[in-house]
Image (spheres, coloured by chain):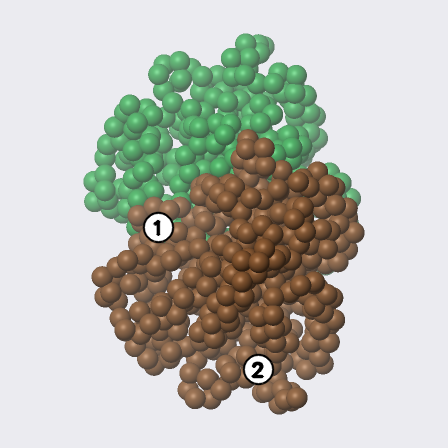
Chain colours: A green, B brown
Amino acid sequence: MVDYRPMWTELDLDLEKHDMLLQALPGMYESTFLTQENRPEAMDYFDFVVGEIHGLRVKELMDHKAAGGKVVGLYCVFVPEDLILAAGAIPVGLCAGTQFSVPDAEDVLPRNTCALIKSSFGFKVGRTCPYVQASDFVIGETTCDGKKKMYEILAGYHPTHVMEVPQKKTPLGRELFLAELRGLRAKLEAETGMDITADSLAQATAAIEAKRRALKRLHAIRKARPVPISGLDALLVTQISFYDDPVRFTEKVNALCDELDVRMGKGEGVATADAPRVLVSGSPMAIPNWKLHRILEESGAVVVGEESCTGTRYFDYLTPENDGSLTGQLGAIADRQLETHCACFTPNDERIEDILTLAREWAVDGVVHYSLQFCHTFANEAVKVEKALAEQDIPLLRIETDYGDEDVGQLKTRVDAFLEMIRP
Amino acid sequence: MVDYRPMWTELDLDLEKHDMLLQALPGMYESTFLTQENRPEAMDYFDFVVGEIHGLRVKELMDHKAAGGKVVGLYCVFVPEDLILAAGAIPVGLCAGTQFSVPDAEDVLPRNTCALIKSSFGFKVGRTCPYVQASDFVIGETTCDGKKKMYEILAGYHPTHVMEVPQKKTPLGRELFLAELRGLRAKLEAETGMDITADSLAQATAAIEAKRRALKRLHAIRKARPVPISGLDALLVTQISFYDDPVRFTEKVNALCDELDVRMGKGEGVATADAPRVLVSGSPMAIPNWKLHRILEESGAVVVGEESCTGTRYFDYLTPENDGSLTGQLGAIADRQLETHCACFTPNDERIEDILTLAREWAVDGVVHYSLQFCHTFANEAVKVEKALAEQDIPLLRIETDYGDEDVGQLKTRVDAFLEMIRP
């Protein structure tokens, strides 16, 4: 077994605190994932990646840095990974999914901030995330007030570059975002000393598109009845897509899909035919936030889709055709990113349409709307989601929670009652 | 005494609920304002305006509508009043300052929303604000997530037009806002059937500028020691500026300032020379939100300034010189509005500078930072304000509260301790 402690020391991690974090993870992972019945064999790779979450992948990033490359951290699907890759840098989604880092954040940030933002920030101030420590800078965005203002404070702890995302989908909003992409390009070129060319960008976009297509393929497979993969496993795969090497990851997801295709051919599934099929929609779930999926699936449901930034809002959007010039590609990337049906936009009725489409095509028995506490954008959209689903007689359970365990019992009770109601 | 009930019926107010609201106000106003010692005589006018808050001014709006004019509601300093006036419409700031309307909002909106937003929305759904009822449409803006998403829901209850405000102060952000101003112009022209011309806009801007200059004059007077007007009275004047007739209001503010000039000449003040001078900075205070000022001044402090949207962020910014063409004027209005040092921008370091300047030039003994609970933007900026003030050895008290009375005792205790510490 490799000793990563010298690397963590080099990354200035708080080793004692970091040990506590790493000690908690295996037990949690085992009880959440490894106890599932009839898992696809190809999940082995993803189990391995999680097992090495602060080890092997970080080592790869450090090797890249040792060879003169750069590592760029990000927190949001609006940051275009392909632009970063095109500059020879590695984009990596940063730690943001656990209560463990929240108390460190609450020493500085307002407590009435969502758990995802507090966890992100706490990982930096507490020095417990090797990814942010390894990153040469992080790219923030203005997708919500909480993150927008947190990044200003984060900039006092780590180099931070903030991209503006417009709030209405207008021609001028597109121009503004395009200017932000050009600004990011200049920033990346200055940091890496490499030019982003039409060729390097086309290659990078192809790699990211292949990843998205693999995730879309996995997502489409979940239409099957019985569904051949659990919601927990599918969510995990999407979560890992944010930090794993994109080419290797894509291969592994396609291998998983190949196995699932065989299962489908045999009518083999992970849940009984009468297990309620649930769509989860709302705030993103950063690794290791598996709380809601675990409650749902332990209670007998099977989650067949995530309308989420760790779900369809990450992989649904592909790059429009363009003339292949750098300008044309940047414009297409702007269009792709702005297509995102995120609650940061006003209005965002496309998201309601997405939920209705997913509910219909994935044949769900009910929808669970998930808002992180203090997440204004998704909590408000829940009002509109509720109205739209009621009009279509699609059952809805609205959950608002954080990363703590205090409400698990209460959530289980509510989930059980909901599943009882929607059981086919 | 005029019977306004026929007018309120015409406005489809919930008369029973509205009666309850109006019954509460006089007692609250009397105990807050009329018990103050040595008030300027010119405050009589503002007392009268508050006494007629749902009467005479609403009647003026209804008369304007009867003559074919339009009334346009707004909630935020980013909406340019002069553009509305230039279309022959009357801009009016809408009710947003009381716990009374919060429960109505909580039937629909997420509870973890700031009191200002809940109160605004509750006034509409509860039909207790004659101003929103009288308005032909309201203009929202994207200055925070809570309002941005509330406006989408509000649009189901009242005609709503939302303007995007950029989040970074960049050239493209200015272009975007200018496009929003052009869009608002088109909307106003379509609604009113009147053209906004260079002349009508210049006249309207002159009226708004005169109002701002009068408020700036009042603000400057508060540098005096002893200060000749209480913080409560000065706040009230700014609050009234959002809905009173601008020309009449300007005259009355200047008359008040004339009286205060005489007081200053005589060294006459409203507080003892050793009363701690306090600057209040943070979230806006819509009428009748006088909670913090009342606690501060009843505890012996005198508030000498509000770094707030109901304070300097409303009246500090004047329209830059321009060529007088409609295009030139619109550009200047964009520049004026975007100058606003609001926490919606990232970064917003100019606000920190403003607070330091106000603290120095208004010779304050301490600053109270006021955040409405769940207001992410100002709550996060409080972190930076605290750091900046600590570096200058300026005492700071951070308050986070809502419109309820439950925490008044606790706030008084904290305020008393703070004043004891900063008493000169």
In the image, B168 versus A320, the foreground residue is B168
User: Alpha carbon of mark 2 to alpha carbon of mark 1: how far?
Assistant: 40 Å
Question: Which residue is labeled 1 in the image?
Answer: B173
Residue B256 image position (x, y, % from top left): 53, 67
Residue under the point 47% across and 72% down = B251
Query: Label for residue B63?
Result: none
Which sits earlier in the primary sequence, circle 2 or circle 1? 2
Residue under the point 71% across and 51% down = B300
Question: Both on one chain, marks 2 and 1?
Answer: yes
Vertical arrangement, residue A190 with respect to residue B83, above or below: above
Vertical arrangement, residue B316 with respect to residue B97, above or below: above
| Mark 1: amino acid | Gly
Relative placement, left or right, of A8 versus B37 is left
Q: Quadrant of residue B39?
A: bottom right
Mark 2 chain: B
Relative placement, left or right, of A288 versus A329 is right
Residue neighbourhood size for the residue with mark 2, other residues' Cα within 10 Å, grouped as few (<14), some (14–19), many (≥20): some
Q: Residue furthest front?
A: B266
